[in-house]
Structures are given as structure tokens and as C-alpha cells.
Amino acid sequence: MPTFDDPVVDATEASAALRGLAHATRQFEDPADTYPVIGDLLSSVRSLRQVLDQLAAAHIASRARAHDDAGSQAAGATSALAAADELHQAGTLLASVEARLDAASQHSGRIAWHPTPAASEAPGARWISVVFLQGSEADEVLDLIGREGTDAAIEHLAGFDYGEEAVQAALENGYVYDEPPLGTLDKVATRDVYTLTYSPFLGHVSLLREHSALPDPALLGIDTPTPAVQKPPPRPVGNAVAAAIQRRPTPPEEKTDWFVRRPGTATAQSRGLAL
């Protein structure tokens, strides 16, 4: 909740709210919701322009207290005035943003959105969300993309795919899509049954998988054979011991899991879902 008197706390909350909005607006279930969102953004831009003007005024009013790292008051005052000028310029540019948003709001308000086609006419859901990362976790993957490319990132994020468990979690949370959801600034890469979407600008990474398709085993690391353990030759035992061994029940055979993790991949507890 806004404090209305603590600019640092309110600025942090506004930043978090806008980041959440950037994620939430990647896909609209009801396009009619775009109209109120545009209206709120228009109000936000007007408030932001006022904030910029007030920040500029604070720099000017307090320039006598400004110093640089070397202790020069003249240099500090010069920087304060320069910052105030840039803030005023930013506020001036927002005037055109405000005008464009106002026009967009008027056009959007004239639209009568029709219902979606009947289920028989619409394509079935084809994509599930495997993992969605943001913040520092996304930064690590974005760095990996910069160093080794998108294939390496897809192979890394495939470690979050737990097969039917991932499908059920996506169905329960509504993270199933006709097409991979994309934001305006998102970049896309595909490999095998996976689609990677990422945005260095907004700082998020998402991996999706075709709903009913199995991935290439190499992406899950299950094509690497496990070295067989060499067992020592059996030692001679007496008749009583041999009889006891024969009476011992044979443990049930373990089934091979298609989605078994290779050493070093993500665990189920570290899995994240989104979208």
C-alpha cells in the first residue's frame, strides 16, 4: 500500500507494481480488459510527469548542499542543476506519451469485443509452461544465452521438466496455452519440443513445452549410460547360509523414469512455474 509520505518506499512499490503489470499483460484472456488498463496507465503517466517535475525541483532547491566525491560544492551544484534539467526534459517527453495514451484510450473504448469462437472451432491447448524465471535467476540464464546461445539455455531449463508432474502442475494453475505467450519485447527460440521466450530488457525467461510431446532424451540427460558397478565374485558360504539367501525375497524391479534427473540438474523443489 502507498504511504503517501515516504518517496523511497512508494517508488519501490511502484517499480514492483509496474514489473508485475509487465508480466501480467503478456496475455489477455479478455481483450476488453485492455481498456481499463490503458486508462490506469494514462493516470500513471500523468502522475509520473508530476513526480519528474518535483524531483527536478528538489535538486534545484537543495543544490547548495550538493558536493562531488572530492568535496567540491561548485561541482556538486553543477551536477544538481544538470540532473534537474534532464528530469524536466523527461517530463516534457512524457507529454507526448500522455497524448498518445489518451488517443489510444479513445480508440479502444470504441471497440465491441465479440466472444471467443466455440470450443469446437478453436484449436486445443498445445503448450504448457515448464518454468518461468525473473530477477537474479533469470539473469543467470540470460548470461548463459549471451555466452553459449539459446540451445544451451533450453538444455539447462529442460532440467525443470518433470514430465507428467509438470503437466499436472500447469493444468492446475492454468499455465496452458494455444500458442506460447509473447510480450512485445520478448525474443523466441525453439529446440525440439521446447520454446524459449526471454526478454533481457524486462529480465525474465520462460520455457514452454508442447503439451503431448516427449522431449529429446539428450536434453534431459538420460541418454548417458550409467557405469555398471563391478561386483566382486561370490564368496563360498555354508549350506545354512546359502539356504537363508535363497529364502530371502527378491526386491521388486525398479521402473525407469523417462524424466529422471542427471546429476547436477534442478530438483523438483527448485522448479518454478509461471504465465
Image (tube, rainbow, N blue to C red):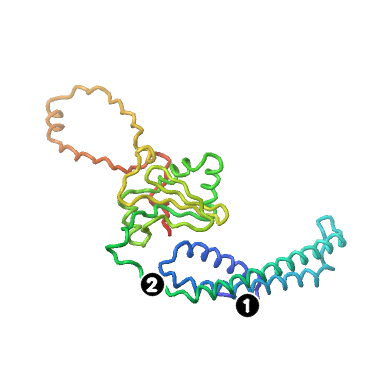
The image quarter in which residue 250 lies: top left
Q: Which of the two discs, 1 and 2, labels the residue nearer the N terminus?
A: 1
Return the residue nearer the eye: 191 or 104. Answer: 104
On screen, residue 2 above or below 224: below
Query: Which residue is pictured at 39% across the width and 40% down the height?
Result: 219
Q: Residue 232 appears at what percent x and percent y? A: 27, 23
Q: Position of residue 31 (x, y in %)?
A: 44, 69
Query: Contact, CB < 8 Å: mark 1 with mark 2?
Result: no
- Relative to residue 104, is residue 266 drawn left or right? left
What amino acid is labelled 2 in the image? His
Residue at screen point 70% across, 66% down = 90
Q: Which mark is residue 50?
A: none
Q: Position of residue 135 (x, y in %)?
A: 54, 55
Task: Decide which of 216, 223 is in the foreground and name it.
Answer: 216
At a point 55% along the width and 50% down the height, the residue shown is 139
Q: Quadrant of the N terminus?
A: bottom right
Quadrant, the C terminus: bottom left
**From mark 1 to mark 2, how far is it between C-alphas?**
40 Å
Seen in the image, is 120 located left or right of residue 33? Answer: left
Disc 2 packing (10 Å; few <14; some 14–19; many ≥20):
few
Please, what secondary structure does the residue beneath circle 2 have?
loop
Label 1 residue SS: loop
Is residue 48 found left or right of 21 in the rendered image?
right
The local crowd at label 1, few if under 14, some if 14 to 19, many if 20 or more residues have their Cα within 10 Å, is few
Dot in front, 1 or 2: 2
Q: Which residue is mark 2?
A: 114
Indicate the position of residue 62 as horizontal and vertical percent values: 80, 70
Q: Amino acid at mark 1?
A: Phe
Task: Classify residue 262 by image quadrant.
Answer: top left
- In the displayed structure, would residue 153 be above or below residue 128? above
Residue at label 1?
Answer: 4
Q: Please tell me how many numbered marks the rendered image carries.
A: 2
